[in-house]
Image: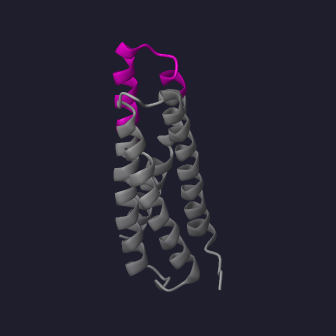
Amino acid sequence: MYGTIVFVHVVSAVLSIGPLFLLMPSIKRLRNVDTSSESAYLSVIKVIIRIVMHAGHALVVSGALLILTGPWPWYTSWVIATLAVMLLSGVFLSTGFTRVLRRYHLPDSDKGEILTVLNRTSWIYIGLMLIMLWLMVQKPMLW
């Protein structure tokens, strides 16, 4: 059973990072499309963010199951650091993408600036996810 949970955890980690790399070309193309194609690209972006969000939920649940059934106690330094980065990335994902996309259709919005923020947000989130991945793979004793 432990091996199955590890598999689910790894797949959900891939699904919580991988689709973000599809976001970059979509944002780049969205800069140069006409208004009729705009909604299609925004739909793709929203689907990507939804996949990342739900994969993150599976990642959290499978990670909790791994800590409960695995050999590492919850108070290990790398587990605590991973939880801290996870909470930070969860807040960042919920505020960084959703709020930015809501502003896109406002009449006085600068769409170029919003897309720049969305692109930067994507890279920051990828960085946070890679930090968590490093903590889970290396399991460093930080204190």
> Of 112 and 23, which appears nearest the observer?
112
Q: Position of residue 98 (x, y in %)?
A: 37, 45
Question: Magenta stretch?
Answer: 28-48
Relative to 8, is 38 above or below?
above
The prevailing secondary structure element of the residues shown in magenta is: helix
- Residue found at the far front of this picture: 108
Give me the residue at 54% from left, 84% from top: 76
Q: Which quadrant of the rendered structure holds the N terminus?
A: bottom left
Q: Position of residue 57 (x, y in %)?
A: 35, 59
Q: Which quadrant of the rendered structure holds the C terminus?
A: bottom right
Relative to 37, is 126 on the left or the right?
right
Coloured how?
one colour
Relative to 37, is 137 above or below?
below
Relative to 121, is 101 on the left or the right?
left
Give me the residue at 49% from left, 35% from top: 114
> Of 91 and 45, which appears nearest the observer?
91
Give me the residue at 39% from left, 53% from top: 94
Q: Position of residue 30 (x, y in %)?
A: 48, 23
